[in-house]
Image: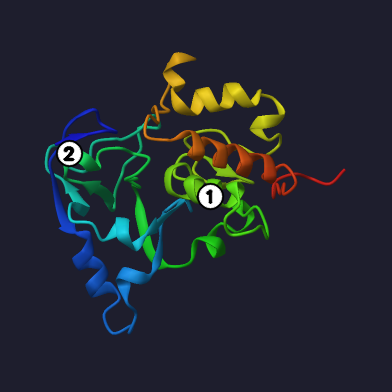
Amino acid sequence: MIDPYYAKPKTFHALPLKKVLDLGFAGSGLSLDKEEYVLRAKDGYAVPFRASRLLEDGAYIAIDDVDVPGWEPIGNQKANPGPFYVVWSKPEQQNLETHARPWQLAAIEIAPFDKVFPHTSPGALPAGSPAIAGYATFRDQCVQCHAINREGGRVGPDLNVPQNVLEYRPEAQVRAYIKNPQSFRYGNMPAHPGLTEADLDGLIAYLSAMKDHKFDPDKKDP
């Protein structure tokens, strides 16, 4: 299987992720298929997963690189992905946005999304509001690469601080860029042909709502 980070076929010694969870949380009394998880890298990077995703067949924890002893460097940083690297074996699991592949994995925790990323919430809004729907889309498809208020992924830019993306890009441009970023510039962000107009409405509503919920832990008070 072609690894999307290495952009070539790779072979690993790996353990089924579901079995690792079953063993790791044995005796906890928890229903693992109903929990929310966060996978933490050695540098503190945290990737959230719903149980429905993390317990899929095809999810593995690579413990060794068969092709290159001591692990082949990965990513733009040419990092060592050890001690553990999450990989997915099925062809339909190669999208990095839907099936994140955190490397340098240090811990797997059971933790609700809103506890791990509290400052990504748009606040108390009606359950059926577009912003809440957009928040769910951000959580499922965007947070692995993008952060809100410095919480989330590090591949793409933060979308809310110091400026919200809607404060320096027109809404129509943001919508079009999310749908097909390659039509604007060549980069790492993939196209999202599966997002409906309602999905885009929700994302725009969520981003707009977050303009009133800025939090930057690194900003120094004047």
Q: Nearer the viewer, residue 3 or 168?
A: 168
Q: Which residue is mark 1?
A: 133
The residue shown at (32%, 41%) is 80
Q: CA distance from mark 2 to mark 1?
A: 28 Å
Residue annotated with mark 2: 91
- 198 or 213, which lies in front? 198
* Quadrant housing the C terminus: top right
Tell me the quarter of the image containing the N terminus: top left
| Residue at the (44%, 44%) spot, across then down | 144
Q: Secondary structure at mark 1?
A: helix
Q: Are marks 2 and 1 in contact (CB under 8 Å)?
A: no
The kind of residue tagged 1 is Ala
Count of numbered badges drawn on the protein: 2
Q: Secondary structure at mark 2?
A: helix
**Where does the image place residue 171, in percent across and percent down from the top left?**
63, 27
Q: Position of residue 38 (x, y in %)?
A: 42, 60
Task: Mark yes or no: residue 185 visible.
Answer: no
Query: Height in image: 114 above or below 175?
Result: below
Sequence-first tag of 2 and 1: 2
Task: Estimate how packed mark 2 is, as few (under 14), some (14 to 19) or many (20 or more) residues with alpha carbons within 10 Å.
Answer: few
Establish if 135 lies above or below 200: below
